[in-house]
Image (cartoon, rainbow, N blue to C red):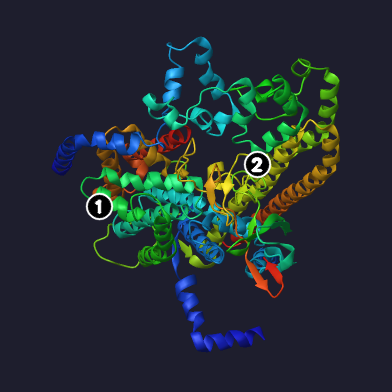
Amino acid sequence: MHRRGFLRFLLSVFSLTALGSFLYPISRFIAPPLASKFTSKLSIEKDLIPVGGAKEIVLGNTPAIIINVPDKGYVAVSRVCTHLGCLVQYDKKSKRLICPCHAGVFDLEGKVLSGPPPKPLETIPLKVEGGNLLIG
Amino acid sequence: MLQKIKEGIEIRFGLNSLVESKLKGYKIPKGTNIFYTLGIVAMFAYMVQAVTGYFLLMYYVPHTEHAFNSTQIIMNTVPYGWLVRMVHIVASSLMLIVLVLHLISIFIMGSYKKPREITWLAGGLLILVTLAFCLSGYLLPWSQRSYWATTIATNIPTALPVVGDLLANILKGGDSVTGITLNRFFALHVAFLPPIFLIIVGLHVFMVWRIGLSVPPYSNLKGFKANFNFMEEKSWTEYREADYKESYPFFPNFVLKEAFMITVFLAVTFFLISFMPTLFIPEAANTPADPFITPADIKPEWYFLAPYQLLKIIPNKFFGISIQIIFIGIFLFWPFIDSKGDRNILKRPLLLGLFIVMLLIWFVLTVWGRYS
Amino acid sequence: MRYILSVLLIFGLVCSASAGYRELFEREFLSKPWSFDRMEVSACIECHTSDTMSPELQKIPADWKNSWHFQNDISCHDCHGGDHEDASMSMSHQRGFFGSPEYADVPDFCGKCHIGILNNYLESGHGNALKITGTGPNCVTCHGAHNIQKASIDIIYGRRCTQCHSYERAKVIKQALFMTENRMNEIEKDLLRLKEAGVFAEEEKKTLFRTQAEFRTLFHTIDVALVNESTDRFTRSLGALDEKIKDNFKELLFRKRFSTFLMLVFIGMGVLISFLSKTYKD
């Protein structure tokens, strides 16, 4: 019965290895996500952006734009066009965001007005705190 | 120390007598082979699906705007999320393969005959419930393949007269596949089907345990390596404890066979995940759903290819679907139809031939559906 | 036997009674886009492929079918206007039809969609030549009218550019573009490999497209100094993209190794269990 005992010992080693190789991933899986991976923030002085003007920023990996919309206030949207990914440009005169690649036209809140883009531009949360804008 | 724990458990649970009578005392007839363990492997596969499913529930969002993104987050951002999802995908297809092998083994051994007809019926219902799990499950990622394969599948009931349209509408929650469909398929997959499955499987396992495993019928096979005495099962007229002329204990002998087959199942699962990770994820399954663009080559998942192909080649839609329903009816109630003959299928070449032909037809239809 | 016969009889009756379901079947199943090829509905194509057309006009649909526009679902009416579903209104001014543009109007015609490129072209030597002299290359000179292919550096070659001036200038700018173009093509191939491995790299694809579009739009200024200046910027962002893609491949390799390890553990367990079960006599 030595053989049986040895086999049982080996089997328990393998089983514990297998158990461990599931317990470790599962514990990482259910652990709360690291804050830095999911969000990034930016703070900008309000006065840098006059009414009707805009400022291009980069939030994390995403190019974005903050617009001071007349009569509506500050708005932050991603500049990545939802069609194929080109960066939209702010046209002050027509109050539109226009994509130079295939003429996708968005309004200042990101809604698609014409052209090939299938979805509106992603809005980025923006809070006004004192003299600063908190984006992200 | 260990001895004290054992004594403590014995006083409170009386485990020893349970182990003696139910595990070591429970007998398995001699001659059973590893195919007899396929039922337990299927049960294990279901447990794997349930566990991985529960973990996926932590991150999946059942809403058309977020479903696809949440699955991508599981695959790429959540630590080891890919492991949980890949196991869930691969084990779902493998579970069906194990179930089909289990079915073939039971059929060939004639273990559906009296007194095991209810066991077979419960098993047949279980395969249908599993297919419902698969259908509701693969809508959830809300990919192109999910959306369009479900559109096809939920249009099939329209072939039935009178109730067809109503049935299709209930399934879809409207006229076409939308967020409503996603919600009800999610509810089906996560809430309705599991207890139904567990109740039926409880009945199935209870019947197997109560009646006892069937003795292999190939007692007269020439050249079969028989160094022990097979026993023909006496015909059943009333319930009695299974009495085997020769048997061995369930624990540890049969349990080890079961454990072996479970490790084979797991090894195959991880082989597929390592070396063929895109086997069950074609391009259409990795593209977000777009109700306005139908991908060129949309096909349902492999287990639905045979009924799909059959429906395509039979011009009369009602005929096509009722042939399938009748076939399912015959399949479920087979033990009542075939109640007389010999259990040994080798003595019934006509039935064996018919069965093999049916399997071949199903296989050919599947491959044809894949490449048409 | 009797039962089987009676069931078959009932079945046959029901089937023949529901023979009318053929039309329903055709409507609900056969004509749906996912059962057969989608049927094209275009009044433009129908007329322009018929023999009533002159040969030059007849070959336009075939040219278009080979183009990158066709692959992206851009059809006749998207550029030329008109109603593509109604043959009587397919060339009606009321539906926005304006035929083929004059030579000097071509840039504005294509620039309806390709805004960024139009702006750069108008500032360039080529755009100025067209505006001032009425001759000079327009979009069609380099890209063709209907058989438009995906933009690549091979559009710049000897015979095309020497129609108006020496190839020297074209060669200089082609050299300036060369390395960056190569890198972008490599990254595109890598992204394809990632896709085949099952990774949905949408963000990286968009970043690559944006970089390619910006770079190629820049070329239309025909300003070698500008291209050289910007090459640094592009190299940096392409480098960052490359890093991300390499990270993806590393992650895929880790996953493969991890699951192979698990597979080996289970194979080992299986072997041990089968040895163990042999020690118990059956």
Amino acid marked by disc 2: Pro
**Residues at marks 2 and 1 on the same chain:** no
x and y percent of residue C189 in the render? 71, 37
Which residue does the numbered mark 2 point to in the structure image? A100
Regarding residue A34, the answer to whether it shows in the image is no
Q: Would residue B114 appear left or right of C191 to someone viewing this image?
A: left
x and y percent of residue A97 in the render? 62, 50
Amino acid marked by disc 1: Phe
- What kind of element bears circle 2? loop
| Residue plotted at (66% across, 71% down) | A128
x and y percent of residue A50 in the render? 70, 62
x and y percent of residue C217 in the render? 72, 36
**Numbered badge on residue B336:** 1
Identify which residue, B1 or C146, lies in the foreground: C146
Which residue lies most toward the front here?
Answer: C132
Q: Check the picture and name the quadrant holding the N terminus of chain C.
A: top left
- What kind of element bears circle 1? helix
Q: Would residue B157 appear left or right of B308 to someone viewing this image?
A: left
